Amino acid sequence: MAAQWHFDEGQSTLVFQALPFEFDSFGRARLRDEEAEQPYRFIDERRRDRVAQRARALDESLTRPGVEHLRIDPLNRTSARLALDLALDLAQARVLNARLEAVEYSPFELMVDNRRASDAVAISSRTRGAVSGAHAIASTLALEMAGGIIPPPLAIITRNLGACGEVIADSVRHLFFYAGPDYAEPVIRQANPALWQRAESTRAANTSMHGYVTIAELMRSLTPLAGDLTLEALQINRLASEISTLVYGKSPHPSTIFPGGNGVEGNRELFTLILGRINTLLDYAKLVVAVWDDLIDFLYEAEPQFQRLGQLPANLISVGLWDDPEFYTSTYATCNEWGARRLSGPGVIVNGEKRTSRLTDLNIGFEEFVEHTRFSKWERQRFSSDPLDNPISPYHPWNKETIPPASSGSVAPGGATWLTSPRWDRESMECGALARLWINAVFQHQNCEFVAPVRHGLELNLPKGNQPAKRLTWYKPERPNALERLRATAYQIGYAGMVAYASLLSAFECLRRGETKMSNRFILPDRSLGVGFWENGSGLVTHHLIVRNHTITNYQINGPAEWLASSLDATGWPGPIEQALVNSPLLEGAAAIDDYRGIDLQRVVRSFAP
Amino acid sequence: MSSEVPALNSETADGATNLLESITLVWLTGVGCNGCTLAMLEAADPGIEDLLFGNIPDAPRVTLIHPELAMESGSHFLATLERAAQGQLGPLVLVLEGAVPEERADTRGAYFKLGSQRDGQPLTLTWWIEQLAPRAEAVIAMGSCATSGGLPHAAGSPLHVHGLGDLLGHGFISRGGLPVINIPGCAPPGEAFIETLTYVFLHLQRLVPLDLDAERRPRWLYQHETYPLPPRVEFTPAIGFDLSNRPVVHCPVPATGWMRKLGGCARVGGGCIGCTEPDFADRFLALARPDPAVN
């Protein structure tokens, strides 16, 4: 039956609602109206009216007394380099408008062009240090798809282990270096003094796990590079980085990963070294969840408006990661099958409704807009369809050309951003830990034996280490918000740890069977297409490439910063962080704009870890 | 290195020497990827926290100003940088991670900036470096982007960038009597950075010599020679490798591993792309391909 509908408990939702796609009875997508002259023009009247209405309301309100402008430049403690422009109504304690600017140009996708194929891995890795392993893997996967090459099972498993290390390190840095300091004693005392008073007299629920008697003690311990939680986070970050180092040779920027394999020797010693570290990290996973559950539950209770901080409708996307070596066959033709078996599975949810979990649908729904960036638009449409004859938009990454401002011309300073605007079915989508846990829960992916989707969320079954065995239960929230993103990041450490645990069991099984090969020959045809779907702690990493004459002629890199911190798209619709800021209440106690630090807004931005 | 420059220690009335108690470390980021910060965080025994707490004997306690770790953002953060530039935060060491974009009149601050003035004009990285470097007791270029322009300098890059030493000039000497100190690598091991920084702190107090080679790299770390290499593969490559004319690159990793003696690129079967050397992407990537005849 046609795959254009997603059937879910008697209800059905169209997979694509903004893009002009429908499905035939074989589940292949096609244009709804093949005669249409401009099928990809923007026709959503409701969207256009809302954007215009909002612009008018904004213009009116900006002239009101009591409306202040605030620019936070630079916005520190993020991986991407960002500046934030805000229009605030302090009297009504709300954000009227938010505009993010990425202030740094990252040139690497252009630098891959005209180079030989395997050089792409090392170059694209350098797009972002915190995402380097994920970029290297995405590049490798795109090349494996282009060449139709499958690495041996043990190479796939070690690649997964490296990614587990990187996701855990990402998560720890996110929780304790980026976002955590915003909830530490010095900030709470200054920005939310009433909360501090209450924290001093509130007992933590999980004292037996983390040792802090009051929430105030916990907040004190979050003070960066002085509090115990942050010092421990430094050590945990190193331990997780050691796992990546063992597999990648160095961290950041792997030196062992190439299409078709991994240069390290997958032997008993390697996996034992990793297993010892995973055991420690799993004990830590039990602790970190206790810390963040206690902190977040306190914040909700003491100040219910925290539910609205950074709130968004559930627009969630994940391409999944951690391939199962029994199913990974690298090609685009089979990607729905092996995608579905990833130990964190793919999916898209729009406005709380499931749309699809097929990688091909995820791919063809993808458009990248540059209208409000410093890049120029490209003119032609290289491809009208993907390798399976599904239609793709002229804005699809396989059609996109990267056109930075001509170096001899002038570049208008200020206002425009260096991050392009990726959208799925023309919606702003959130990716990262919350998206992954939510998608695995509602799509009921059951590919990791230690992770179970249940009616209310996910159960992670952690084994005994120095701490007793523990079942961590992640509860799917009503709506995404800043604190739930952080809670999900804490649970993500346990998730990645159990994927590593399952991967190590598979690795030892490979050794037992004598399947120790670590690389297969990689030969790239002279003409091909590829896409690498992967993720890091903060979300999606996709590399789209085109090969002609063994040389890369187009390379498009999209990371979590693009999805999360993008600004307006072609329809004037903001990116997820910008939207989340506009929905947020202002809780900081400040009399005048000169005292105002924008701590609420910084909390919202850092909940995403762009 | 200059003996006329006085040590940073203070002398007491009876002629004894007080060690330097505290120092401010300003870490700026330029065009790059933030990977050198991650590498720095990986170092342990000692790690960055040991420097912050003053745990290293005879080394000062460090106050770190770093955009990825700073408590402050926006104008408060910039004000702190300005106070450092005006000498209000005591002795200063400047570290740059990332390359410096060339600033032309029509592109000022467009490709990278660190804050803006009130009228919206961007504050360029060059401007910040020109404010801070003259004040610094030592200036350190961390990572290949900062030492020589790194990957953003390679063929196909639409940017014009250069390293910190190119910006400040070969003859630059810091207040502490040192040239720009280069710690190349993409990224270099964090342990190399922490070790070099510790030696710089001790050298500024005239407690130890600081042995830099002709490229202004710590000699004891970069005297090791190695070669660009492909990763270990389990098939026979289509052609053999010509081992007779391999270029030499200098890097501590083959001798020390990556972190805590683990990993280490070619030591564990990875490739070596010579990432400590200038223009490594154009010179050495071809030598690191697993199967160069077909790919």
Image (cartoon, rainbow, N blue to C red):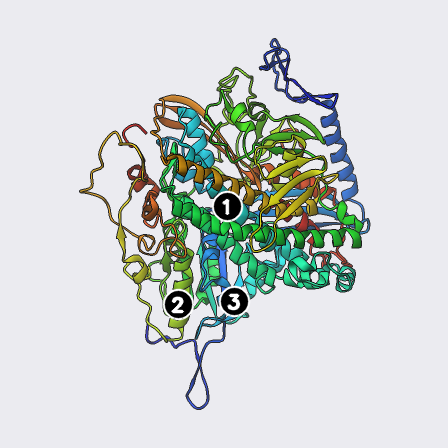
Residue A19 vertical position relative to residue B138 in the rendered view, above or below: above
> Which residue, given by chain and number where applicable, does mark 1 sit on?
A166
Q: Which part of the image, by quadrant, shows the N terminus of chain A? A: top right
Q: Residue furthest bottom?
A: B14
* Residue A582, placed above or below residue B219: above
Image mark 2: chain: B
State the residue position of label 3: B52
Type of amino acid at the residue the image marks with label 3: Leu
For mark 3, give the secondary structure.
Answer: helix
Q: Is residue B86 left or right of residue B141?
A: right
Q: Image height check: is A403 above or below B137?
A: above
Q: Chain of mark 3?
A: B
For the residues labelled 3 and 2, the Cα–Cα distance comes to 15 Å
Q: Is residue A211 left or right of residue A80?
A: right
Is B30 or A475 nearer to us in this picture? Answer: A475
- Callout 1 amino acid: Glu
The C terminus of chain A, quarter of image = top right
Q: Is residue A566 visible?
A: no
Q: Cβ–Cβ below 8 Å for labels 1 and 2?
A: no
Q: Which mark is residue B200?
A: 2
The reply to whether label 1 and label 3 mark residues of one chain is no
Distance CA(mark 1)–CA(mark 3)? 26 Å
Amino acid at the residue labelled 2: Val
> Of the residues under marks 3 and 2, which one precedes in the sequence?
3
Please, is residue A156 above or below residue A210 in the view?
above
Task: Kindly report which numbered mark, 1 or 3, lies closer to the viewer in this rendering.
Answer: 1
Point out residue A379 in the picture as x, y percentages from the top left corner: 51, 23
**Residue A117, how many percent across, how many down?**
37, 31
